[in-house]
Image: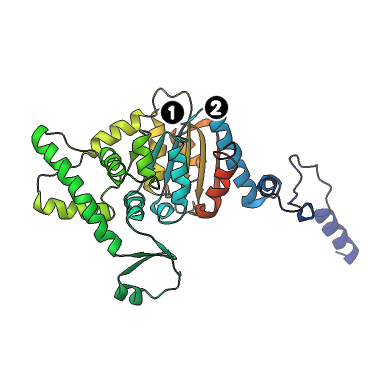
Amino acid sequence: MKKEEKTNIARKNILRRSEEAGGLDIRGYDFNDGVNWEELIDSFKTTGIQATQLSYSIDIINEMISEKAFIYLGYTSNMVTSGVRDIIRYLAEHKKVGVIVTTAGGIEEDIIKCLGKFKVGDFRAKGAELREKGINRAGNIFIPNSRYCDFEDFIIPILEEFYSEQKKTGEVVSPSKLIWKLGEKINNPNSIYYWCWKNQIPVFCPALTDGSLGDMIYFFKSSHPDFKVDIAEDIWEMNNSTLGKEKTGIIILGSGIIKHHICNANMFRNGADYAVYINSSPEFDGSDSGALPEEAVSWGKIAVDAKRVKVYGDASILFPLIVARSFAKKK
């Protein structure tokens, strides 16, 4: 084949005329217009990549709100370890969500923060040095172990109260009732669960024993061997909470058990009408943690016609931006 013929073939393959693509023009924020934070966030819609996914999530959540969907908020414990705890507290305080699902750390660390502060640390801090000082590290957040000693002093009388009731009436406390009691007893407006108790927002913790709460129950049960916690009551309440709702929406920060617990409950109503996932887990390994919303559609956990999006990224950055342009927008 002659050189000119090769060039013509290459040109034909590469320089093909195409159809015009539909959709919005890609365009970022123009700082020549100064700094307008609302417009900056709004510009994400046409920025592309995960910025556009973030913009979709804001649109979906705003529609959840305008359509008065019953909203399930799930988050992993690191959200409460971090300052996102205060964002979640705002949502509970103003009754912006209908049900909360989190892990043991997501319960205890809210209460512990009412007893003592956490500090900004360093991701590269030496574990051995921190261990010597009795300082626990969650990423770049430092938590003195004394906070857990104070938590023991706080929670043991509450467990005694429930145990006494169990002995008298045979009634076994459920995790959700225990969480409300913690919120009532801490009596602190900085607490998520104070507001959940006050506003009667159910909080479900399917992994109640996987944290310091579990440690406290372990120590308590060693001297009260017949003490029980009724998780069956909570799964009954959780699944029933989805039934009869005109529309439901789910917002999940992170993955793992909190993600599946919410999605699985919505399967009982043939799927949620809206879904926003924010996490950094990949889907290649087949785990539910990284699964896209499309996988939940296949199970009937998210409705076939639901508006749904997954945003890849760190919820400690993304969720405050979302709340700023949705739940808190009209404050």
Which numbered circle lies on residue 67?
2
Residue 178 visible somewhere in the drawing = yes
Which quadrant of the rendered structure holds the C terminus?
Answer: top right
Amino acid type of disc 1? Asn
Which numbered circle lies on residue 151?
none
Secondary element type, mark 1: loop
Amino acid type of disc 2? Glu
Residue 230 position (above or below residue 151): above
Question: Which is closer to the viewer, label 1 or label 2?
Answer: 2
- Residue at 76 percent across and 55 percent down: it is 31
Residue 47 % position (x, y): 70, 50
Q: Nearer the viewer, residue 290 or 53?
A: 53
Q: Nearer the viewer, residue 316 or 83?
A: 83
Q: Nearer the viewer, residue 124 or 113?
A: 113
Residue 134 % position (x, y): 30, 70
- Residue at 43 percent across and 39 percent down: it is 92
Q: Residue farthest to the right?
A: 4
Whole-Å distance between the Cαs marked 1 and 2? Answer: 18 Å
Residue 202 visible somewhere in the drawing = no
Classify residue 197 by image quadrant: top left
Q: Which residue is mark 1?
A: 270
Is 130 on the left or on the right of 285, as rendered?
left
Residue 148 % position (x, y): 27, 59
Residue 209 % position (x, y): 25, 50
Residue 121 position (above or below residue 156): below
Local crowd size for mark 2, using a 10 Å CA cut-off: few (<14), some (14–19), many (≥20): few
Secondary element type, mark 2: loop
Count of labels in the image: 2
Q: Mark 1 or mark 2, which has the lower sequence index?
A: 2
- Residue at 63 percent across and 50 percent down: it is 51
